[in-house]
Structure formats: structure tokens, C-alpha cells
Image (cartoon, grey):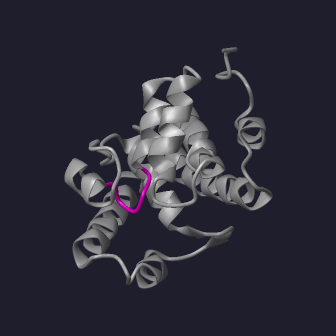
Amino acid sequence: MPDRTNIPPEELLREAGCSRKVIDHCRAVRDCACEYAARCPDADYSLVETGAWLHDIGRSIDHSVRHAQAGADLLRSWGFPEPVVRIVECHLGAGLTAEECVALGLDARDCMPRTIEEKIVTHADNLIAGTTRVTIEESLASAIHLPEEIRQRMYRLSQEVERLCNTQKQP
């Protein structure tokens, strides 16, 4: 299989078969995530940008909750570095434990965001509805169907990212 790691992310999304709507959403998440990465001294900006662009590439395969693992598997098969793959795999809500994955019919994988880059992209995805920026409160209100524990985790993640990214990087 040819190396795809040097192809621009937007082109990869098209090549994978993502719709214009998904690509536009990924661009909006990228923009939001990059705003956070620019303010977060410990974040790898390039990793955040690539991970945010590709976070929904699995929607070319499946539009259910399964899209995160499907996207991660696709990127692994294309030789992408594990830090990018993990952003894709962990971006749902505020992540899923292996037990939660099994309960949802997914592979038993730890899909909890652990690195600052994983957390930034996950948080940014929670703040983008389609292509519209929303507040975390609006995001949580639209996630009322999720268990309270998961919504609380989403809120805690938002607070952590906001705290970690509240300073400007020094030139």
C-alpha cells in the first residue's frame, strides 16, 4: 500500500469517501482545536491539526459510534503514527473505557483521551455542531440521551482543556 501519511488531510478525507458535510465539520473542528493548541504550551500543534482534520475519517465507513474505531483502523492500515491514530480512536464525547466499548458492541479498547492533543481534539469536536461553534453547555444539552456519567466526563474534560490552554505560548 502506498504511503498516505504525506497526503494533505483534506485530500485523504475525500479519497476515503467522506462527504462534503463531514469534511466541512472536520475543518471546523480543526480550526477550533488549533485555537486551543496555539494557547497550550505543552501541545504539539501539528499533531492537533492533523488529528482534528482526520478525527471523523471513519465516517467514510460507518456513521455510528463505530466510526472512531473504524477510522483508527483505517489510519493504522495506512501507516499513520500511533499519536494521530489515538486522537481518532479517542475523540467520542470524552472517550470510552474498554467496558463501555464492549457495551456498545465495539472492540474492547481503551478509548479514553490521555494526551493533551487527544483531549484538545475531543473537546473541540464537542464544541462543533456541524460547522457551528457551540458552548459546552449547549453540547451537553444536545447529549441529554447519554448517561449522566458520560456527560459529566465531557464537562470535566472541557474544564481541564480550558485550564491547560488558558495561557499563550511564549515566542
Residue 19 located left or right of residue 119: right
Quadrant for the C terminus, please: top right
Q: Quadrant of residue 80?
A: top right
The span picked out in magenta is: 91-96
Asked if 104 appears above or below 54 in the picture, the reply is below
Q: Magenta stretch: residue 32 in it?
A: no
- Quadrant of residue 12 within the rendered picture: top right
Residue 51 coordinates in the image, percent (x, y)? 55, 40
Residue in the foreground of this view, choosing between 142 and 119: 142
Question: Residue at horizontal 70%, vertical 14%?
Answer: 2
Q: Please tell me whether residue 4 is drawn above or below residue 165 in the rendered image.
A: above
Position above or below: 153 against 79: below
Q: State whether the magenta stretch is mostly helix, strand or loop.
A: loop
Q: Is residue 171 visible?
A: no
Furthest toward the front, the residue is 105
Where is 125 relative to 9, above or below?
Answer: below
Q: Quadrant of the N terminus?
A: top right
Rendered residue at 47%/49% (across/down): 68
Q: Residue at x 59, y 57 (%)?
A: 32
Residue 98 in view, yes or no? yes
On screen, residue 54 versus residue 91, left or right, reads: right
Front residue of this view, candidates 15 and 123: 15
Residue 109: image location, x then y, percent: 29, 42
Is residue 94 within the magenta segment? Answer: yes
> Picture coordinates of residue 98 (x, y %)?
23, 48
Q: Residue furthest top?
A: 2
